[in-house]
């Protein structure tokens, strides 16, 4: 069972991408970092469409979105730092010729889990929110 199963009912697209990152973390670090960054991008796009507290910044690429003042204020320092780390590791995996280490993939996947946990706790609807938050306490 995936650690990201709590995403499946409400955010199946996020679940699919996050599960790929998780599944590759120990076997294909570059791919895991790519999928962690992809999941983050999908999640941040979703947040900007569904969270009325967020206002689009000057540009709509991932870096601008996570550095946007309303995102940083809403997410707080810890979640912002996690999002930035996922973005940086994913970009490095795609654009660099440097070897991507297993520890990079594990870090990206771990930070993605924390980011998705925050997303679910903040945005899950009704019954799913209660179930998600309860399952995350265990």
Image (cartoon, rainbow, N blue to C red):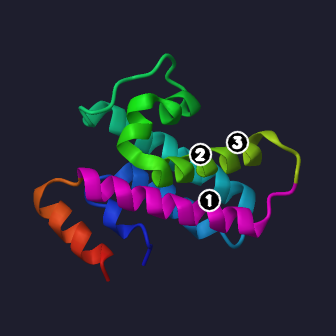
Span highlighted in magenta in the image: 99-123
Magenta highlight on residue 115? yes
> Where in the figure is residue 16, as x and y percent of width and height?
45, 56
Residue underneath mark 3: 91
Q: Nearer the viewer, mark 1 or mark 2?
A: 2
| Label located before the other in sequence (1 or 3) | 3
Picture layout, residue 136 above or below residue 108: below
Q: Nearer the viewer, residue 62 or 39?
A: 62
What residue appears at the point 57 percent right and 63 percent down from the top-left corner? 109
What residue appears at the point 58 percent right and 32 percent down from the top-left corner? 63
Q: Label 2: state its secondary structure.
A: helix
Residue underneath mark 2: 84
Q: Quadrant of the C terminus?
A: bottom left
| Label located before the other in sequence (1 or 2) | 2
Whether residue 54 is visible here, answered yes or no, is: yes
> Where in the figure is residue 77, as x and y percent of width and height?
48, 49
Q: Residues within 10 Å of mark 1 (few under 14, many from 20)?
A: many
Q: CA distance from mark 1 to mark 3?
A: 11 Å
Left or right of 118, for residue 122: left
Is mark 1 in CB contact (under 8 Å) with mark 3?
no
């Amino acid at each position: 069972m995936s650690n990201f199963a709590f995403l499946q009912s409400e955010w199946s697209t996020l679940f699919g991408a996050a599960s790929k990152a998780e599944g590759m973390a120990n076997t294909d670090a570059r791919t895991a970092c790519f999928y962690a960054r992809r999941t983050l991008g999908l999640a941040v796009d979703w947040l900007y469409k569904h969270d009325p507290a967020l206002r689009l910044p000057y540009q709509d690429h991932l870096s601008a979105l996570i550095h946007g003042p309303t995102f940083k204020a809403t997410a707080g320092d810890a979640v912002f730092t996690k999002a930035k780390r996922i973005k940086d590791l994913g970009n490095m995996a795609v654009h660099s010729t440097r070897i991507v280490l297993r520890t990079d993939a594990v870090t990206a996947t771990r930070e993605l889990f924390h980011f998705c946990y925050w997303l679910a706790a903040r945005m899950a609807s009704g019954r799913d929110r209660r179930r998600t938050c309860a399952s995350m306490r265990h």
